[in-house]
Image: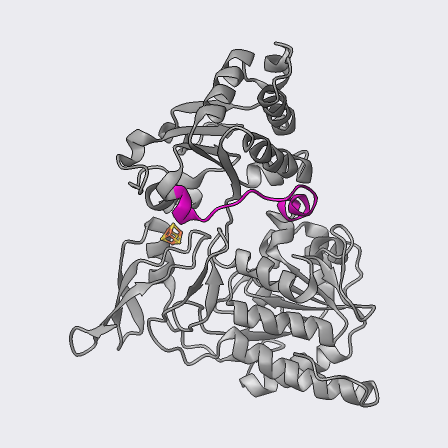
Amino acid sequence: MSEIGQNLRVVEHATCTFCGCVCDDMDLTVDLDAKRITKAKNACTLGRAWFAEHTIEDKPPARIDGKPATTAEAIEAAAQILAGARLPIIYGLSDTTCEAQRQAVAIADLMHGNIDTTTSVCHGPSGIAFQGVGESTATLGEIKNRADLVIYWGGNPAESHPRHFTRYAVTPKGMYIPNGRKDRYVVLADVRRTPSAPVADLFLLVKPGRDFELLWALRALVKGRKIDPSIEESTGIPLATLETLVERMKSCRYGVLFFGMGLTMTRGRHFNSGAILALATDLNEYTHFVAKPVRGHGNVTGADNVVSWQTGYPFGVNFSRGYPRFNPGEFTTVDLLSRGEADAALIIASDPGSNFPKRAIEHLKRIPVIVLDAKDTDTTELARVAFRTATYGINTTGTVYRMDDVPITLRPAFDSPFPGDEEVLTALKDRLRVLLNEKRGGALRKAA
Ligand code: SF4
């Protein structure tokens, strides 16, 4: 960090937490008077917008029933709601630090509630598939240095993760990829031509809903089985194209399959994720091959890691029996809300009020909702208690996980008058413990 003028500071090697690429090579120029970032060197268009939009607004630190409140008053109100609930739920967590996520798991455990993350509506099926099939994995650094065959399946990184191509997997030069793009063969499989398609040497236009069949056909070809030419009719891809691709897959030095929500959130879901993971495993009989999900939110991978360390499961975890149970479809937030089972909700750094199904949002409107967010959203609008918190990575330090499970320490750019998520959640946990102890006759053990 260096001061370059009376009111300007440059924060070097800062991290962008807008998407799962978590680029940690940002040089941020900060106007300390205006408390805003005026330049974000190395950021893509999305990253620049993320940094530019985060200013300190002249708003109260909390609201209770729409009226301004102090953080302490809001903590008391939130603790009272959660202590009195029968099935309180926690949701969100993919845009906050691992330290805050850890506190959220402790709260769910303490109140015998339910905890779920945005993974349940993006790569949850991959989390299920990992348990059944396993994962042949690598870091993005290893992929940059070694991968000479790069396959993207069901994603549009040019628009969702703009630096995935340039920083990690397509154009950068690597230790064993000295000529960058020229040393890589790039394949893209999707149901439509997106702005990512021009980057590919081979584009596979897959019939919608036929990813599983296509992946299974590739597995069969890798294993030397015969495939009927009618595969083209069912998947949209000619058999000859698949055979050539399989030869390339088996003969490359190092291959990678990146897969996105086009695979996990369409027909087949965890079967699709399982098929692509199994394909990578099959290919390891011939060469080195890995498969990685391309993750969306800045710390959704951290959420998976933290919830897994602490409960044994990655998302959709229920503590109502006093120990963790995992059952997607039963303990995932959309389902708990749509069935009208949750009677209080703690939403952290997420906006289900704008993107959940109508039935789930209708139930959110009926129950007391507590929200922690750095900005106003549809969910803060319907909240009984709303905390305004500092933005992770811009105002607070902490740990986030890149999409390849590499932890990165955040370097904040400037202070915020608002508390961080971890601070609010720690105070909420402490107050909740006292209330629940009283309610349960002092029998509560001290949670982590
Ligand atoms: S690719 Fe993602 S993490 Fe990297 S600068 Fe762009 S938005 Fe930020």
Residue at the image point whose x is 69% and y is 64% from the top: 311
Using residue 60 as the reference point, say whether residue 49 is left or right of it: left
The part of the chain drawn in magenta is 125-143
Measured along the vertical axis of the image, is residue 180 above or below residue 377?
Answer: above
Magenta span dominant secondary structure: helix
Residue 204: image location, x then y, percent: 49, 23
191 and 152: which one is in front? 152
Please check the rendered image and state whether residue 312 is part of the magenta-colored stretch, yes or no.
no
Answer with the quarter of the image where residue 391 lies. Answer: bottom left
Measured along the vertical axis of the image, is residue 214 above or below residue 178?
Answer: above
Please check the rendered image and state whether residue 128 is part of the magenta-colored stretch, yes or no.
yes
Give the residue at the far left of this rendering: 5
Residue 258 appears in view: no
379 and 102: which one is in front? 102
Answer with the quarter of the image where residue 369 lies. Answer: bottom right
Residue 5 appears in view: yes
Residue 159: image location, x then y, percent: 41, 42
Give the residue at the far top of this rendering: 229
113 and 355: which one is in front? 113
Residue 249: image location, x then y, percent: 48, 26
Quarter occupied by the N terminus? bottom left
Residue 49: image location, x then y, percent: 35, 56
